[in-house]
Structures are given as C-alpha cells and as structure tokens.
Image (tube, grey):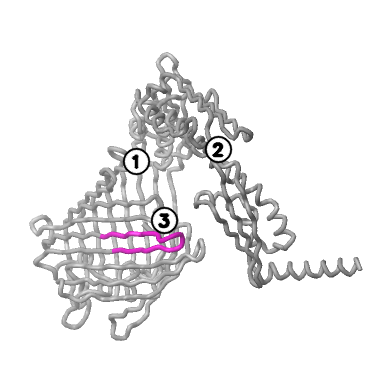
Amino acid sequence: MYLKRHWLLTFLTCVASFSLHAETSVSVEIRGIGTELEKNVRQYLSIEQQKSHALLSPARLQRLQEKAPAEIKKALQPFGYYKPTIKTELESTPDQWKVIYSIDPGPPLPIAEFNFKVSDPIAKDPVFQKLINSIKMGPGRPFSHIEYEKLKSDMTRIAAERGYIAAHFETHRVEVNLHTYAAKIQLHFAGGPQYHFGEVKLEQNVLNPALVNRYIPFAQGTLYNLNKLVEFQQALNDSDYFQTVEVSPGQADLSAATVPIIVHLTPRKPNRLSFGIGYGSDTGTRGKAAWEIVRLNPAGHRTKTETMVSEIGYRASFNYQIPIFDPRTDQLVYSAAAVNERTDTSDSTLYSVGANLNHSRSAWRETLSLNYQQEEFEIASERGVSSLLIPSANWSRTWGNRHIFTFDGVRTLLGIRGAGSKLASDTSFYQMHGSIKAIHSLGDHHRIISRGKLGGTYTDGFNQLPPSVRFFAGGSQSVRGYAYQSLGPTDTSGKVVGGKHIMVGSVEWEYHFDPKWSVALFYDAGNAINSLADELEHGTGFGIRWQSPVGPLRMDFGHAISHEERPWRVHINIGPDL
C-alpha cells in the first residue's frame, strides 16, 4: 500500500511539475504597502527573481515560499519597519499560479537617542549649517536606514567639495533594540582644517605649459574640491593630446593649508588614420578616409584631411584647428573643401575656403564663419557659375545627458547667413533658418519624437543662387516617402528648382519591445516653397530601429500620400538621437 502511494505521489509531482513550467505562469502580488516599499520587497524576493525560471517546479516553489517571509522582513528594515505581519496565499488556476503576500509593516522603529556632533570648523561652515538644519532625525521620530546613510553621504560629499580633506567620522553607530523597540544613533564628524588649491606642477613635454594651464578649472588659492580634480582630468583626456593623464593631489602643506596638484602627461601618437564604409538611402553606398594630425606643434594645433565618396558625389576637405580662449570649447578653424553633389534635381561642384570661430557662450554653442565659395551648377534647365562671400552665425544647444540614445531631450539650431553683391559676390541674399528636435518618454517603452524646420531667403536674384543656398525637401531627415531633395517649386517644364523658404514638421511614436529593438509609426509634412500659399507634401509610414553603439539604425518605409501614385520608399539612416 505504501509503495503504491509513493509511486502515485511521484507521478502527480511529475505531472504538476511538467504543467507548471510547460503550461502555467507564476505571478507575485503584494498588498498592504506603498510603491517604494513594494519595489524594495520585490528586489529581495527570490520567488520574484525566479518566477520565470524554466525549471521552476512545485517543490522549488515551496522552497521559495518558505524563504519569502525572512526576505520580506529584511527588505522592510532599511525603512525602519522591524515588526511586520506577513500573510501568504497561493492560488492556482489551469494556466497560472498566483502568490499573494499581504503585508502589515507594523509600527516604524522610533529613535530613542540621537547623539550628533560635528567639529567647530564644520559647525561654522554655512554650507554644513544648511545641511544640519535640514536633518529630520531626532528622538521620537521614526528611524530610517536610508535617511541615515544619505546624511552620512551628504556630509562626506560636502566635506570633499569644501576642502576638508582630513574629514572623517569619529563615530558612526546605530543600535537597534528589538526588546525595547527603539534605536540609538551616535554620529560624530570631525572636519579638520579647510584646505585650498596650491601650485599645479606639470610633468610633461607635450604642450606649452600655458596651453595646459588653460584646461585648469580652478584657481590657485580657491577651496580644494575633489570634483574639480576629476573635471580637470576629464578635460585633459577629452583634449585628445595625451595617451595617459594622471592628476593627483600632492603632499598637503599643513602650515599653509594648501594641497599641490601633480599632473603627469604622456603624449598620444600624433597621426591617426581612419576608414569607413556605409550606406544611406539619401547617399547610397559611401566610403570615407581621414588623416588627422592630433598634435602638430607644442601650441596644440591640429589638422584633419578627409575624403568621402558616395553614389551622389564626393567631398574632400582640409581643416587646420587652433585652440583659443578656453581650449576645451573654443577653436579657430581654417578650412578648404571641394564638394560635388548630383541629386534628382541638381548637379553642382563647389570649391570653398574659409575660417570659423567655434565658441561656447554659456550653454549655447556659437559658430561665426566667413567663407568664400565658387560653385558651378545645373538646376533643371538653369546653368550657372556663382561666387559668394558668405558670413554666417549659428547657435546650437542640446538638453539631455544621453545624446546617442535618449528618452528625454531637445536639440535646437538657429542660424543666419548672407552675401552682398558689393562684397565679392555675384548676387545678394539674406537667409535665416532654425530647427528643433524633441524626444519625450511615455513610460519605459514608449517615445514621442517630434522635429521641425523653418527657413527663409530674401533676395532679388533667386535664379542666380546656386543649389547650396536654395532650399529643398524630401529624404530620410525631411519628408519621408520622397527622394532626397526631390521636393520644391518647379519650373515651366515641371522640374524642381528649389525654393526660397522651407517648412517641415514631423511626429513619430516609437515602441521598444526589446532593449535593442523598437518599431515606429510616423507622419511628416513639409516642402520647399516660395510663398506661404504653396502646398505642403505629406508622408506617413512605419519603421524599425536597432540600437547600435553609434546610435539607432533606422529603416523607415515611407508612403508619399500627396503623390498621385502614392509610392513607397525605403529610408535608411544611422546616427545619434540628438
């Protein structure tokens, strides 16, 4: 009889086990506590972490259930709850197992004693005074490990920012007595003297010391701040001049209360070659080769020579860059370029020389330019050669910390340019343009991406303007569903000749069904126009995205709904979100 029951139990266990991981799922429901507590409880619960395990069986589920009360108690303790009441229910249906935890966290642990002391320099420091006045812990108040650890972290951080390099906790102890159900806290913090930055000692033969000193984000004699050292090291790393960068505090001068800074730098190899090949629906197959001399001389000058060839033309350019003012953000760049582009609407070859001043003005990036260009062009039945001396100014700004892939961010660009017939130019024109792209998240899996572009040209000799200063629409970054630069006003034969103005807008919904993959639906509208009465073209469609290391790879299927035949067109693009 025993043997029969043993075999029956084994059989039922096997059937239940097969059913559990082959046909059913496990859900975990937590009741009675707030969102913050529930989130921490789920992180501690083994059954939450293993509920989708392929080998989850009734026996394993039972073991996880037995561990759960202790795990829940441990998860509640950082918030000061040491006497919870936990009830467990297990429900089963043909297609699901459901585990329910009803939790009464009980009374929060009160603070019986709060022994808090700081040394005199700390007590007199206005920044520390503000922190001390904000402390909510005290006798009779609920104790929270999270609040306690945050206070310690804030004191350590402020000490590092305020030059107290010898600051430390003489005592930091919490005693929890579950019999009396009370906590005793002892927290004693000694600051020591307040130090300042001393001399910066450079150990390098790479660049002129005067140039390296311009990377320093602090002045000698100001309060010592560890964050400033990190910023200094990051700026030298970002300069691209050095193979290794070591920025470290030296031996403190106790009598002067200063800390010297030691900087050891080794040079990077001066020459850098790069090659690339790619594809875009606007350009077709394309290849690129570049040669960069990252350090031409001790003054930090650098050059870059680049050639790019695609199915619609070529570009060869040379830049000579000189660091000025703040070398982290400001450069004077002399340039020369030859560009050929053959699109469905135009064919042009442009030669240019010029100079750009790149400068950061607060959070805005400013570029002031003066370029002289000669362009031989053909647009529809128009042929011509244009010479223009073009001064221009552009301002750009980006909000958001992650520019390659972001869930929330904005990028905007504003620009003006022009030429005068009395200043080495064949004709006069004045042009203004602006663009914006905004990304907004809706939960963890959804994004709304919107963009817009406006531009206007004022001239009495539009027919003399080359393609490089006319407006065209269409392409992967414009109205999708239409070929690159295929939209705009036409001549009497119906061929696109470009417009004086441009107006483009787009809205896109994107859903992430996987960390690396997403799908999108979009609607675009816009055109290059000569007056506000001109009609806009419309495109809609869908796309798929893959998160590559250099930014999303986007494949869009655009539907030209304004076109009589309503054709579809594939657009491929890769690059950062912002």
- Tell me the CA gap for discs 1 and 3: 21 Å
Residue 194 percent coordinates (x, y): 41, 21
Q: Quadrant of the C terminus?
A: bottom left
Instruction: State which quarter of the image contains the N terminus.
Output: bottom right
Would you say residue 443 sits in the magenta stretch?
A: yes
Q: Residue at left 24%, top 70%?
A: 472
Secondary structure type for disc 3: loop
Q: CA distance from mark 2 to mark 3?
A: 46 Å
Mark 1 = which residue?
Answer: 328
Q: From the top left corner, tell me how far across and down residue 177 is, in percent.
A: 61, 32
- Mark nearer the N terminus (1 vs 2): 2
Residue in the picture at 37% in, 51% down = 400
Residue for point 37% across, 24% down: 125
> Regarding mark 1 in the picture, which secondary structure is present there?
loop
Left or right of 161, for residue 78: right
In the image, residue 475 sits, relative to residue 192, either above or below, namely: below
Give the image quarter of residue 346: bottom left
Q: Sequence-wise, which precedes: disc 1 or disc 3?
A: 1
Which of the 4 quarters of the picture holds residue 29?
bottom right
What amino acid type should be assigned to the residue bearing mark 1? Arg
Residue 139 placement, left or right of 540: right
Task: Tell whether position 390 is magenta.
Answer: no
Q: Which residue is mark 2?
A: 109
Front one among 277 and 411: 411
The disc labelled 2 sits on which kind of residue?
Leu
Q: Nearer the viewer, residue 54 or 348?
A: 54
Determine which of the numbered discs, if any, sits on residue 404 in the image: 3
What residue span does the magenta drawing correspond to? 435-451
For this rendering, which residue is in front, 332 or 255?
Answer: 255
Give the image quarter of residue 443: bottom left
